[in-house]
Image (cartoon, rainbow, N blue to C red):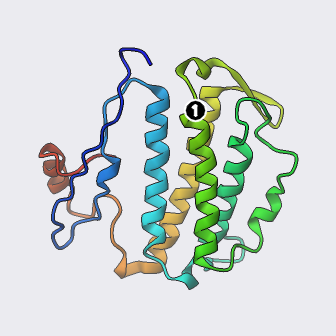
Amino acid sequence: MSILQTRRVHTPIQPQLRAGDFAYNSSMAHQLTTSYIEDSLSIFRQYKSLAERALEQVSDEQLTGTLDAESNSIAIIVKHMAGNMRSRWTDFLTTDGEKPDRQRDSEFETPPSTRTELMKTWESGWRILFHAVEGLKESDLTRTVYIRAESHSVMQAINRQIAHYACHVGQIVFLAKHFQSGQWKSLSIPRGKSEDFNLRVGRGEASQR
């Protein structure tokens, strides 16, 4: 680690929530760092938490609900993300990110039948991802890895996956908000609360991440 890089030391802040507040995720508080790997890990954790806070708000039935015949359910999106993570991050530096035994099309069929099974699938994918990324050194960023035989620098491969997962987490949040409608608890800045949020960030009571 260079002298410019920093370690994250989280001191969770858990303010009392007032009516209309959103559920502030204190463990994701922004920390200044010049380490690409540390910041990438922070972003991965941010999106994992965002999806989980959306998943908590939907019923078991809504996990498999779709908007139309061409849409994926939340459960299918979770299954696909986990399958992608297993393929991309297993032996990340030494094998192609598209594993020979991956059956991608099956990720969009027959999701786990219970919430418990679904969350076990979800956690298994993230566990592989974090094991791989936490084991990287900054000097690894310029190494070459392959996805479907196409060469990527390690940094490019990480960026590719951050963008991919952010897209799918956005879909999960959209579906959860749609299903919950008026019962939805905002995961970002609620309407009409921007100024209040800015003040809370300034007081150290909330974070932009």
Q: Residue furthest bottom?
A: 61
Tell me if residue 128 comes above or below residue 188 in the rendering: above
Residue reaching furthest to the top: 3
**Residue 51 position in % (x across, y down):** 48, 61
Residue 155, quarter of the rendered image: top right
Q: Residue at x 35, y 81 (%)?
A: 182
Indicate whether 175 appears above or below 135: below
Q: Which element carries disc 1, helix, strand or loop?
A: loop
**Residue found at the far right of this picture:** 100
Label 1 crowd (10 A; few <14 / some 14-19 / many >=20): few
Q: Which of 95 and 160 is in front in this view?
A: 95
Q: In this view, does 175 lie above or below 96?
A: below
From the viewer's perspective, is 30 left or right of 146? left
Tell me which residue sits at (18%, 67%) in the image.
17
- The residue labelled by disc 1 is 135
Residue 74 rendering spot, x and y as whole percentages: 59, 70
Depicted 126 relative to depicted 179: above or below? above
Q: Tell me which residue sits at (45%, 42%) in the image.
A: 43
In the picture, measured across the screen, residue 15 lies left or right of residue 151, that is left
- Quadrant of the image containing the N terminus: top left
For this rendering, which residue is in front, 137 or 207? 137
